[in-house]
Image (spheres, rainbow, N blue to C red):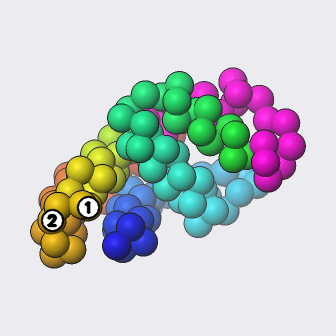
Amino acid sequence: MEEKVKDLIRESLKKRLKGHDAIDTIIPNDSLIEHWVTAIMAIAYNDNNLELASQDINEIQEKMYGPISIEDTRAFVFLSSSRFPDEITAFEKYIELRDRESEDVIIYAVKEELSYVESGDFMLI
């Protein structure tokens, strides 16, 4: 079920990027989307506590890559929080409903939250 929700969020992020070329000169947009999904999930799982979300992500990154600046992680999480409020709310809805509602109800609720995203509305700043 969580994978279906993540797929809906990925589609929403792609929708935001419509009309934009490569956002980064090093990392392709598809890879950025995966990074953003991680941030969205961390923020939602930590009840929008950006510091806790940053610590969670930083801990995972350090296990994979070695020491990573927590300041860089905080900046990434803060920017993700500002850029993707609808996706965060959608994932929070999933967390809220996952143990007590059917898959159909959850998917409907997530899609409802993502319906506010407009094509091409990605913010570079």
Q: Residues within 10 Å of mark 2 (few under 14, many from 20)?
A: few
**Which sits in the foreground, 15 or 114?**
114
Distance in Å between CA atoms under marks 1 and 2: 6 Å
Disc 2, SS: loop
Per the rendering, the mark at residue 98 is 1
Disc 1, SS: loop
Q: Residues within 10 Å of mark 1 (few under 14, many from 20)?
A: some
Left or right? Give the position of 66 relative to 109.
right
- Tell me whether circle 1 and circle 2 mark residues in contact (CB < 8 Å): yes
Q: Which residue is drawn at the image coordinates 38% and 67% (left, top)?
A: 2
Left or right? Give the position of 93 relative to 74.
left
Left or right? Give the position of 26 relative to 54.
right
Left or right? Give the position of 123 relative to 118.
right
Quadrant of residue 73 in the image?
top right
Q: Position of residue 3 (x, y in %)?
A: 42, 72
Per the rendering, the mark at residue 18 is none
Q: Position of residue 22 (x, y in %)?
A: 61, 58
Region in magenta: 62-81
Type of amino acid at the residue the image marks with label 1: Arg
Quadrant of residue 13 in the image?
bottom left
Q: Can you say which quadrant of the picture contains the N terminus?
A: bottom left
**117 is within the stretch colored magenta:** no
**Which sits in the foreground, 50 or 31?**
50
Type of amino acid at the residue the image marks with label 2: Glu
Q: Which residue is drawn at the image coordinates 26% and 61% (left, top)?
A: 98
**Which sits in the foreground, 71 or 60?**
60
Residue positioned most to the front: 99
Residue positioned most to the right: 66
**65 is within the stretch colored magenta:** yes
Does residue 29 show up?
Answer: no
Where is mark 2, residue-wise?
A: 101
